[in-house]
Image (cartoon, grey):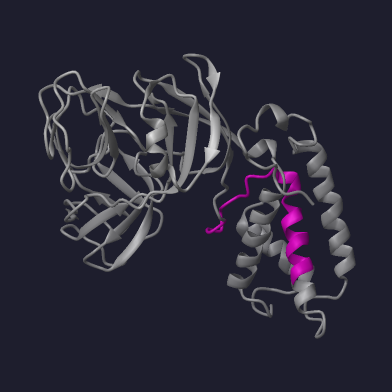
Amino acid sequence: MNLSEIRTQILVELQASVNNCVFSTATINNLINQKYMLLMRRRLWSFLLKEATVSTVYTTVSATSTSTTLNATSVAGMSVGRKLVVSDGTNFEEVYISSISGTIITLTGTGLSESYAADSYIFVDNYFLPSDCWKVLSVKDFSVPRNLDIRRTATVDRELTQRKSYGDPRVIYIAGTNLMREPASGTYAMDTSSSTTSVIETQLTGTTTDYYKGWTCFNVTRDLSATVSAYNASTKTLTLESAITAQVATDTFYLIPRLTEFFLYPLANTSRALNFRYKLLPEKLLNNRDVPIMPDAYHMLLVYEVMVALATADRYNKRAGTNIGTYAALSSDLYNQMVDDYSILAEGASECMVTGDEDQDDQI
């Protein structure tokens, strides 16, 4: 069932129509989404498992670099706002990219405090988890091969002294949300053919398809924002999750990543393809045709869960019905069946997938 069909089934249970229902469509939609997300959090469901590969970026200095000018052998995989670590093997400095022109990287602030000769190392330091990642279960470097130890911290910058080495990564630090804006200063201007839901800008620095997915596009001209749902690197086009009213070409904007950062220890001095196995973050059901990711046979579970909530909230004036126990029993039976069919924990397989200090999912 899609969102509209789930809502209709709830109206059937309420013995009401859209016109005579005492609960608004918005109220029912909100309850459906609340119950949906709660059900998805309760277990490690097999239908929520997903894999993605994130490639590390490493290059060298091409000519002596000082201050805010960093001469790179390659800038592939880099973009404005990203954090770099520059090293000659003894010194390790953290810097941010302000702009890229050819293979010349301009750095923010005062830039480098040391001079770095050709063949010194340049590492991209901050990477992002997939935008739909809810919980990382395991990370594997197939080139070794090795599972990386997962550590969650909000203070990874303080631990740079522990990460001042390079080689085969052994630890991944998951460190919270990155708020660095792009461009680091100033704004972009939308090109011709931009619309309320599509932003085209040839100056965008992301070179990987979907690089900006999950970021926030802030329209300075309209003082409005929207989440980027997709990015086409070849056409430099951002697709927005929702329309920005009256947005047109020449509007100015900037981008803010709202993705979870991760860092590696040691820094990877060769190109690595890290395989992430993670629990998917389901998208909210916003449009009538949106369908829950759970198998079709269990969509009625959302109906029963919402009916319990409505009946409980409205038990005294009886508009939503008073038979809370019946709906609670129906919900419990269907939920337990879904556990038997799709819960990874019920299959006893979670131990081999959950690594690091991550707790098991909440259980009922």
> Is residue 115 toward the left or the right of residue 144 in the image?
left
Q: Position of residue 194 (x, y in %)?
A: 23, 53
Q: Nearer the viewer, residue 284 or 176?
A: 176
Q: Quadrant of residue 156?
A: top left
> Is residue 53 toward the left or the right of residue 49 in the image?
left
> Is residue 183 toward the left or the right of residue 335 in the image?
left
The residue sitting at 14% across, 20% down in the picture is 118
- In the rendered image of this protein, does residue 303 appear above or below residue 98? below
Q: Quadrant of residue 324?
A: bottom right
> Is residue 89 toward the left or the right of residue 292 in the image?
left
- In the rendered image of this protein, does residue 209 appear above or below residue 108? above
Magenta stretch contains residue 95:
no
Q: Nearer the viewer, residue 46 or 277?
A: 277
Magenta stretch contains residue 307:
yes
The residue sitting at 64% across, 61% down in the picture is 34
Q: Quadrant of residue 216?
A: bottom left
Which region shows up in magenta? 285-309
Q: Position of residue 251 (x, y in %)?
A: 19, 61
The residue sitting at 80% across, 49% down in the picture is 335
Q: Position of residue 249 (x, y in %)?
A: 18, 57
**Residue 272 seen in the figure:** yes
Residue farthest to the bottom, as pictured: 317
Q: Position of residue 275 (x, y in %)?
A: 50, 26
**Residue 244 seen in the figure:** no
